[in-house]
Image: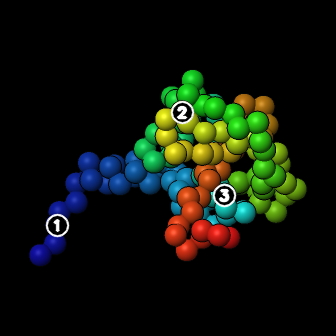
Amino acid sequence: MSKNTTGADIENKKNKSDKPDDTNLYANIKHNGWQAIHVGLEQDDVSIDGLQLWHASSDWESSNESVELPHPAHPHESLKRFVIYKIKNTNIKFAMTELSNGVYGFYQHMKKTPTDIGK
């Protein structure tokens, strides 16, 4: 049996596919324990473990450390300095930098698994 497709079904599929999925877009960009997750404007919907980072910006704590990482959208370019942040009262750790005027890049620190301990 075939299901009848309505105009609403087509519109729903179109709307879902129009929004880029950062998870898939940057899935292959990993560097020294960091996973690229987003490039976009301030207040964009970028989240880690369901927490919207910009909405939690008052809870960002700078580690006073930085890490050199490639531009998430242009990994072949020279490395950029990303400041490392942690969200208060969570285990969320990320690196962020302003790549150009009002455009930010984010990396998520990849949690170590038991097999990574000692590396």
- Disc 1 to disc 2, C-alpha distance: 49 Å
Point out residue 109 in the picture as x, y percentages from the top left corner. 62, 53
Q: Residue, x 82% and y 45% (percent of image)?
A: 81
In the image, taking residue 41 as reference, residue 70 lies left or right, namely right
Picture coordinates of residue 114 (x, y %)? 52, 69
| Residue at 72 percent of width and 63 percent of height | 32
Q: Position of residue 119 (x, y in %)?
A: 68, 70
Q: Residue furthest right?
A: 78
Farthest residue, direction front: 118
Q: Residue at x 83, y 48 (%)?
A: 80
Name above or below for residue 62 compared with residue 34: above
Question: Residue 59, relative to residue 36: is it above or below?
Answer: above
Nearer-N-terminus badge (3/2): 3
Quickly name the residue at label 2: 88
User: Can I make out residue 23 in this image?
Assistant: yes
The tag earlier along the polypeptide, 1 or 2, is: 1
3D distance between C-alphas at marks 3 and 1? 43 Å
- Give the amino acid type for the residue marked by disc 3 in the picture: Trp
Q: Are there few (<14), some (14-19), or many (20+) residues within 10 Å of tag 1?
A: few
Viewer-proximal residue among 89 and 68: 89
Which one is in front, 94 or 55?
94
Badge 2, how many Cα within 10 Å: few under 14, some, many 20+? some
What residue does disc 1 label? 3
Say which element carries label 3. Answer: strand
Describe the element under mark 1 as helix, strand or loop.
Answer: loop
Label 3 to label 2, Cα distance in Å? Answer: 20 Å
In this rendering, does residue 25 appear at all? Answer: no
| Amino acid type for the residue under numbered disc 1 | Lys
Q: Which residue is mark 3?
A: 34
